[in-house]
Amino acid sequence: MTTLADRPGERLERLWAEEPGLGTWLSTVDHKRLAKKYLYTALVFLVLGGIEASVMRLQLAHSNLKLLDPETYNQLFTMHGVTMIFLFAVPIFSGFGVYMVPLMIGSREMAFPRLNAFTYWGFVAAGVFMYSSFLIGRSPDGGWFGYTPLTDKAFSPGPNIDFYALGLIFLGLASTGAAINFITTILKMRAPGMTLNRMPIFVWGELAMQVSILFAQPALTLATVMLMLQRHWHYHFFDPGAGGDNLLWQHLFWIFGHPLVYIILLPRHWHYHFFDPGAGGDTCCGSTCSGSSAIRSCTSSCCRASASSRRSCRRSRAGRWSATRGSSSPRWRPRSSGSACGCTTCSRRVCRPWRSASFR
Amino acid sequence: MFSTGLPSLALSFVSLTSFLVAIPSGIQVFAYLATLVTGKPKLTTPMWYVLGFILIFVIGGVSGVMTASVPLDQAVTDSYFVVAHFHYIMGGVALFPTLAALYYWGPKIWGRKLDEHWGKISFWLTFVGFNLAFFPMHILGAIGMPRRTYTYASHLGWDNWNLGETIGTFIMGVGILITIVNVVRSARHGEPAGNDPWDADTLEWATSSPPPDYDFETIPEVRSLHPMWDQPELKTGAQPPEMGGRPLAEGHRVLATSLLDAKPEAVVDMPHESMWPFVLTVGLMGFFYGALTRIAVVAVLGGFLSLVSVVGWIWPRGQTQEM
């Protein structure tokens, strides 16, 4: 075993190692190094967003405090929301994904390593871009949802909202790129034999998250482009006085915003992996339920992204579909109809043909 | 959206579909619980975070069902009730799994386990602080405190609730900081983790911790949903070729497989490190600052640099071999 394994290992080390140094720190395409950068950067943004929240809570600790003036308070709660959602909650699970997905599917890299590097740097740059607004004291102040007409030129003449809109366009480029990278990696680079049925649940969650981003993010990017056009080039998308519609912004924003809840939630399905090793017994239940629920979530958030109303009813139909297939039977099935001897290995084996059939 | 003046048919539709969201979410929670009940969970730090997450998800889900009702939503809209709801759903649901993931995957990423003792202290501070910070917001919203206001009058009786929330925020902050310090410390001084500290089933635990640059010595052939449990040869560090492992050591290469069945299709040469992604980001940064300050020269230069780096990036290089 060792003699067999050692020689390719050395050769692989030569082929895959990157030169240490500052140049490589900037130019690395290794998914593990980039993922660590993602994690550290997102944690820094978590701390920044936490500081903003703490300052706001100090201001609100008692009535009539004068720690912050209203304008600063507006900037803080906007940047708190933007930071926590766009710069912490979504990227940190992109970070875990960039690290774990290639490992979980038995590959050596993401499908597009340099795109991976670009999406990381784009995420950092968009964050730095938005935070640079603090240097001139003109941070975004229209809420993380940026409702018009509050964010229109008439009510927000300064550069505050420009930081917000341009920053989100920038971040949108990075997120869309990352989504394409993840989807390609997961669908095309799995180890031989890892059929879709055998894909770990975390990878399903990541796939569902990235497909949702691919559908949802363009709505936000386009809405912010429209906002910039309206603010600086006299367009009237959101101006009822000139035939536009304020609600249009809200619809466009929430076409992005509601799938976003699932973008944040879905990869967090991975906690089934704690249950499985911790369970020590009947593993069929957890994996099968979670497998079907991730598919359900995938279908549902894609559908939601395409629906212009607040909620899409197809979501729940998909949910019921998974209820009959996933959740209602697996808990009992392997035990009652399953193994003759009752041991976990047998029950898993018996469960398997049924499980593969259910996804075809 | 219920207070924006949508026509009543649209309101009923939106309300109905909002209610229906509760069904798959409820199934999800029962799936969590069923897994916990049928297994023998070990109360490690990540598991504590998962338990905290389930409770927070349920509380946030219940207030979500409440806001799906049009009359109730119109009463509490723009109040702290909504703030409470979305901090439970977007805040707690984002935060707790993140912290759990740090404890769960930390051993793989840094090669060392995170400190369990401080992990549990961190969990309890975060959990208690979180609920102290956000649960009273439901009550404040119900008694009328509007969101997005920077202060409030003293005769309204909101002071004590708000003080409690502020204290909760700082307790939670301390809890999160403990985890961050724990990560920084344990990444250097923690107990070495070994390849697979959790006896988990997925492939990332087949590699050393942290994994080598090439991740897998041989690209494994997977024959199970739980490869690490059902294929004992993976535990040795590399699947030998006679068991299906592919060394792929002739170049900087990965394997591409088919979409559904993961049948090998091609060997792909992967790119080495490259400055172009970073240069492209710098160019875009210039473009966006130019657009912000409306100085055309900066925007044009930034755009030009971006184009140059895209050309450098896509310049032909390796090749793909069909199998």
Image: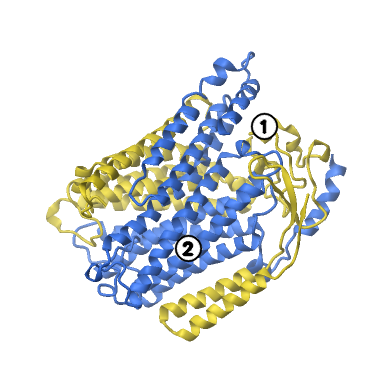
Chain colours: A blue, B yellow
The Cα atoms of the two marked residues, 2 and 1, are separated by: 40 Å
Q: Residue at x 51, y 54 (%)?
A: A92
Q: Residue at x 71, y 62 (%)?
A: B271
Count the marks: 2
Q: A246 or B114, which lies in front?
A: A246
Q: Is residue A75 left or right of residue B216?
A: left
Which residue is situated farthest in the left direction here? Answer: B155
Where on the picture, by quarter, is residue A137?
bottom left
Amino acid on which the number 2 mark rests in the picture: Gly
Marks 2/1 same chain:
no
Q: Quadrant of residue A164?
A: bottom left
User: Is the residue A267 above or below the residue B232 in the image?
Assistant: below
Chain that bears disc 1: B
Residue A4, quarter of picture? top right
The local secondary structure at tag 2 comes to: helix
For the C terminus of chain A, the quadrant is top right
Instruction: Identify which amino acid the numbered label 1 is placed on.
Output: Trp
| A312 is higher (above) or lower (below) than B293 | above
- Residue A277 seen from this side: yes
Taking depth in this image into account, of A67 and A121 the one nearest to the observer is A121
Q: What residue is pinned by disc 1?
A: B229
> In which quadrant is the N terminus of chain A drawn?
top right
Tell me the number on the disc at residue A172.
Answer: 2
Position of residue A89 measured from the top left corner of the image (x, y, whole percent): 45, 53
- Residue at the farthest right position: A3
In front of the other: B227 or A53: B227
